[in-house]
Amino acid sequence: MEELERRYRDVIGRGLPYLVAEYGIDIAGYGYCAPYRARSAYRYALEDSIYIRQDMTGRGVGKRLLEELVRQSEALGYRQLVAVIGDSANTASIGVHAACGFLRVGTLRSVGFKFGRWVDSVFMQRPLGPGDGAKP
């Protein structure tokens, strides 16, 4: 809980989007954008994170969250949005990102270990606004 609160305060403190999705009276999930990297060269790129409650998947909640994160990130002047998906078997997350204009740009094989097995990191990317077509 402390780590979640720390992330929330960091994201909000930077003026970045942090969203909570409701489905009826339930919290269905949340999503936010954080700096992609700390170094100044990456200051126009964000990384999105989306978490959907297991019993709320398949209802379009993730897509709605991601669409709004894209919209708010563009409005803030950011140029690239990166997704680092923690398992190449996470076809739902890969599909939602693809549906929102992200392209798969790479896979790091077996860099994580969770749930008793090695997992890949799938990198996906989407330009925001003019992307790299113009200087900031």
Image (cartoon, rainbow, N blue to C red):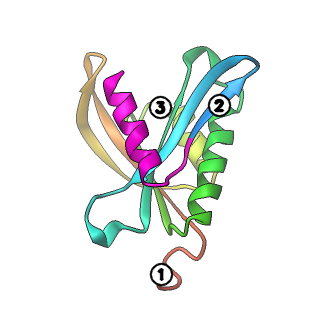
Whether residue 123 sits left or right of residue 130 in the image: it is left
Task: Provide the residue designation for mark 1.
Answer: 136
In the image, residue 136 sits, relative to residue 117, either above or below, namely: below
Q: Could you tell which of marks 3 and 2 lies nearer the N-terminus? A: 2
Task: Provide the residue designation for mark 3.
Answer: 90
Q: In the image, what residue type sits under mark 2?
A: Ala
Crowd rating for badge 2 (residues with CA inside 10 Å; few <14, some 14–19, many 20+): some
| Pick the front one: 22 or 129 | 22
Query: Which residue corresponds to the image point at 25% horizontal and 65% vertical from the top-left?
Result: 39
Magenta residues: mostly which secondary structure? helix
Query: Which residue corresponds to the image point at 58% horizontal and 39% vertical from the top-left?
Result: 19
Whether residue 113 sits left or right of residue 134 in the image: it is left
Circle 2 — which element? strand
Q: In the image, what residue type sits under mark 1?
A: Pro
Magenta span has 15?
Answer: yes
Residue 124 spot, x, y in % from top left: 46, 53
Quick one: which residue is furthest to the right in this view?
24
Q: Are marks 2 and 1 in contact (CB under 8 Å)?
A: no
**Which stretch is magenta?**
1-18
Task: Provide the residue designation for mark 2.
Answer: 21
Circle 3 — which element? loop
Crowd rating for badge 3 (residues with CA inside 10 Å; few <14, some 14–19, many 20+): few
Alpha carbon distance from label 3 to label 2: 20 Å
Alpha carbon distance from label 3 to label 1: 34 Å
Residue 59 spot, x, y in % from top left: 71, 26
Q: Are marks 3 and 1 in contact (CB under 8 Å)?
A: no
Crowd rating for badge 1 (residues with CA inside 10 Å; few <14, some 14–19, many 20+): few
